[in-house]
Image (spheres, rainbow, N blue to C red):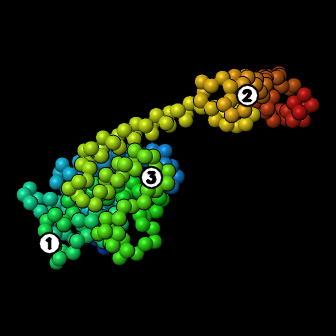
Amino acid sequence: MDVWRQLDHPHVLKFYGACLVSSPAFFVCDDATHGSFGEFFEEDKSQMWRLFYEAALGLGYLHTKKVVHGDLKCNNLLVGSDYKAKLCDFGFSYVRSQSVGLSAKSQTEAIRWKAPECLMPPDEDPKPQFNPRFASDVYSLGMCIIEAFLGEAPYGIMDDDEIMTRLFDQEPYPRPGGMKDDEWTLVEKLIQPDWTKRISLADAIDELKRFADREEEQSARTAATRECSTCEASMPIEFAFCGNCGTSMTRADETSQAAAASAQQKNACPRCEENVVSTDHFCRHCGYCLDADPAFV
């Protein structure tokens, strides 16, 4: 919590304080009202790359503060009330010293997101390069992206021993469905088994920004569409004819507008003679029941 208290960034969950003498102890932080990435993506994946880009910015900030998160997964990536990505849960983070090596705090055993260098038994090889480091967070970020595309934890129901074997044998992770070629190329660079060859976070941020921009452009194009009145296909708003069935989109618009105008045609109330809309059931001025009048049936 001492580490968390010192952090101040729009993509890091804000920590305000804690009470450790109560039972149970508690802390106070920003309320991420839209839940974790996993929960958010169940409902809406249209902003996925923008959120991962923001998460990477938050991670970059941690690294400038000599903090290794050490426990990245979609449950620890949140969506705030402002719909911005927020990194949280630094209970297992590692603080890199100004010199060499990392603190000896224990880490979580969530191996499905962890880089191979984090999983070496310390009694077999206690060298500093087998401790969590900044590059380890980059690997975990890649596994978070895989998790988002899968809709479940990486490796599914595979047991931990089998996962460890695959990691140490450097077996490539299978490409999730729905991922574009350039997106998968980035993920492969993020989850490169050799941390010395892994993409830098700065370069990953540039790529994520490109994907986020493309995602935004796609959303804008999707918004600028209209539905064909004949086959209900969505067409770009500038199309004069439906590319699916050939219906005139201009004529369909005119028909739709005429129908709307007809529905809003005004008539006089038989009782008060004020204007009323033909779709009303009662006069808005005097309360007369228009349904009882044949002129309004």
Asked if one can make out residue 17 in the rendered structure from this viewpoint, the answer is no
Q: Earlier in the sequence, mark 1 or mark 2?
A: 1
For the residues marked 2 and 3, what is the alpha-carbon distance in whole angstroms? 41 Å
Element on which disc 3 rests: loop
Question: In this orientation, which residue lies closer to the viewer: 74 or 244?
Answer: 244
Q: What type is the residue that disc 1 sits on?
A: Pro
- Which mark's residue is nearer the viewer, 2 or 3? 2
Q: Left or right of 93: which side holds 126?
A: left
Asked whether the viewer can see residue 293, the reply is yes
Q: Are marks 1 and 3 in contact (CB under 8 Å)?
A: no
Q: Which mark is residue 247?
A: 2
Q: Tell whether 43 sits left or right of 142.
A: right
Q: Secondary structure at mark 1?
A: loop
- Residue 23 position, x and y percent, is 31, 73
Asked if the residues shown at circle 2 and circle 3 are in contact, with their CB atoms under 8 angstroms apart, the answer is no
**Going 23% across and 58% down the picture, which residue do you hit?**
195
How far apart are labels 1 and 2 at the CA level?
Answer: 71 Å
The residue lying toward the viewer, choosing from 2 and 239, is: 239
Is residue 149 placed above or below 286 in the rendered structure? Answer: below
Could you say which is closer to the camera, residue 231 or residue 280? 231
Q: Which residue is mark 1?
A: 126
Q: Which residue lies under the disc numbered 3?
A: 34
